[in-house]
């Protein structure tokens, strides 16, 4: 797809060694930039227009003749690394986080999915981790409530929890079942048509356990553990499949992908790693679903701060108004943070850096519904359809904010090399000999790895 950018991960040790070899005899130009430390170096080394206060965007130059090898395995001992693949910016992907469990993440995902269908945008809903499966299937819920008319797909791991074949033990879903057919798929976009009418729509569950508890507890009781690297690899693979399926190479928004987490921001994943740390290498822009109930102000602000302190861009906060003044309090907090510290969450609006807060109607009380995977539920939970209809305007605004924010991000990344050429000074460098394409744009750092934005193979 022409003109799209994808992030790759450079190993920091490789970068340091390569920089030293390139600049040998003229001084180690990038020593100050790339010395061993938990950051990008001193802010004075970069143009203030390019370097955000949280050190998430900078630019520097390598020789165009230098051999480049893309490293995907890093040396961090505290943060997992991007296991494989790239994340395309042609089809923006967002991560849906919750201030706590049961705050309405899946309801918000369903509302955003319906908003995407109203805009005729292809849509992917990805649930990497699900417990209480198959009775509780968020992918089934989103597909049904968005009126997508599709049957969600499941991975081989989730197929075990669904009872499509029994696990023989161990971490491999096929272990002990070599003669039994696995109904799950690792390629949902290849094996599903994406719906019979309207824009393509996919909903997929990757890893699942039967017990309705935290993923780490479910693994302890049922087995079939999943490493952080495997989970990251599956997310990047599905996002790549989605981009390949719907990307048109012409626009910045060819479709929308949502990756919904399990529980709250700091809830553990299957391995026990906090999800905010587990998914950090991807650094997907965040949509935070706040808590509108009593006590929700504290949990929402704490969740917001956890995401920001870990380097996530929080695109917006969405919460149902429970009548306790949470919306106004959270909105005031976001305003105060932006005005006092120059919040780095670059909003699509040039005149505002405030994280917008969208208020939905109060969620109606409803009896618990037993869900069965693949069963038509359009006749169940009619009050939720009504609630989603009443919140259409809010969901449309939130989706517009997300797509506009994404467009602004792509624009910043595309223009960073030109701004670097104009504003930065690289010591011991003949600037007239540096081509703009030799400027590497670093979007973020995770452990010892850098997320670097480059054009894809098609230009």
Image (cartoon, rainbow, N blue to C red):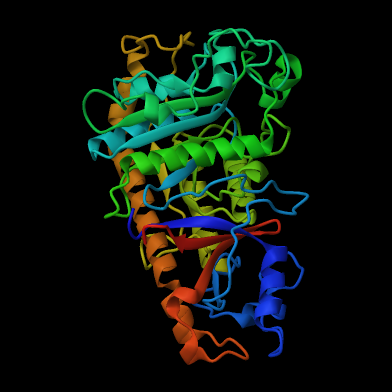
Image quadrant in which you'd find residue 111: top left
Is 395 left, or right, of 284 in this rendering? left
> Does residue 413 appear anywhere in the picture?
yes
Instruction: Residue at 42% x, 57% y: name it.
Output: 456
Nearer to us in this view, 221 or 224: 224
Give x and y (percent) for residue 347.
42, 60
Instruction: Residue at 62% x, 89% y: name it.
Output: 427
Looking at the rendered image, the quarter that the C terminus falls into is: bottom left
> Does residue 364 appear anywhere in the picture?
no
Give x and y (percent) for residue 185.
48, 23
Above or below for 70 versus 292: below
Instruction: Residue at 52% x, 54% y: name it.
Output: 313
Give x and y (percent) for residue 32.
71, 79
Nearer to us in this view, 190 or 110: 190
Looking at the rendered structure, the number of numbered marks drawn on it comes to 0
Instruction: Residue at 50% x, 27% y: name it.
Output: 186
């Amino acid at each position: 797809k022409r003109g799209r950018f994808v992030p790759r991960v450079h190993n920091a040790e490789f970068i340091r060694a390569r920089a030293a070899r390139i600049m040998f005899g003229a001084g180690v130009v990038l020593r100050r930039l790339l010395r061993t430390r938990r950051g990008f170096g001193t802010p004075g080394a970069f143009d203030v227009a390019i370097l955000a206060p949280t050190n998430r965007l900078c630019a520097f130059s390598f020789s165009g003749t230098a051999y480049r090898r893309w490293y995907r395995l890093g040396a961090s001992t505290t943060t997992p690394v991007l296991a494989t693949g790239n994340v395309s910016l042609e089809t923006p992907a967002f991560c849906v986080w919750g201030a706590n469990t049961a705050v309405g993440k899946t309801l918000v995902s369903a509302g955003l999915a319906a908003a995407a269908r109203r805009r005729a945008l292809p849509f992917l809903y990805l649930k990497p981790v699900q417990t209480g499966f198959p009775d509780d299937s968020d992918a089934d819920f989103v597909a049904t409530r968005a009126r997508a008319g599709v049957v969600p797909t499941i991975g081989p791991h989730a197929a075990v929890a669904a009872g499509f074949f029994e696990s023989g033990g161990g971490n491999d879903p096929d272990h002990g079942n070599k003669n039994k057919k696995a109904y799950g798929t690792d390629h949902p976009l290849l094996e599903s048509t994406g719906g019979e009418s309207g824009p393509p729509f996919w909903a997929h569950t990757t890893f699942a356990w039967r017990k309705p508890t935290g993923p780490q507890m479910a693994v302890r009781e049922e087995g079939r553990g999943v490493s952080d690297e495997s989970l990251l690899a599956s997310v990047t693979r599905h996002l790549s499949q989605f981009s390949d399926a719907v990307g048109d190479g012409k626009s910045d928004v060819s479709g929308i992908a949502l990756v919904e987490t399990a529980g709250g921001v700091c809830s553990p994943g299957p391995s026990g790693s906090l999800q905010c740390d587990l998914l950090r290498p991807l650094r997907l822009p965040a949509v935070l679903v706040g808590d509108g109930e009593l006590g929700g102000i504290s949990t929402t602000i704490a969740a917001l701060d956890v995401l920001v302190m870990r380097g996530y861009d929080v695109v917006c906060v969405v919460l149902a108004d429970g009548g306790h003044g949470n919306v106004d309090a959270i909105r005031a907090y976001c305003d105060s943070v932006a005005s006092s510290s120059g919040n780095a969450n670059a909003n699509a609006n040039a005149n505002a850096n405030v994280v917008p807060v969208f208020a939905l109607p109060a969620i109606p009380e409803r009896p618990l519904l037993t869900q069965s995977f693949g069963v038509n539920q359009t006749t169940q939970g009619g009050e939720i359809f009504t609630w989603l209809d009443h919140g259409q305007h809010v969901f449309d605004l939130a989706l517009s904010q997300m797509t506009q924010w994404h467009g602004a991000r792509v624009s910043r990344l595309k223009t960073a090399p030109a701004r670097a050429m104009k504003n930065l000074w690289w010591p011991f460098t003949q600037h007239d000999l540096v081509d703009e394409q030799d400027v590497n744009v670093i979007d973020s750092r995770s452990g010892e790895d850098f997320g670097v934005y480059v054009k894809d193979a098609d230009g």
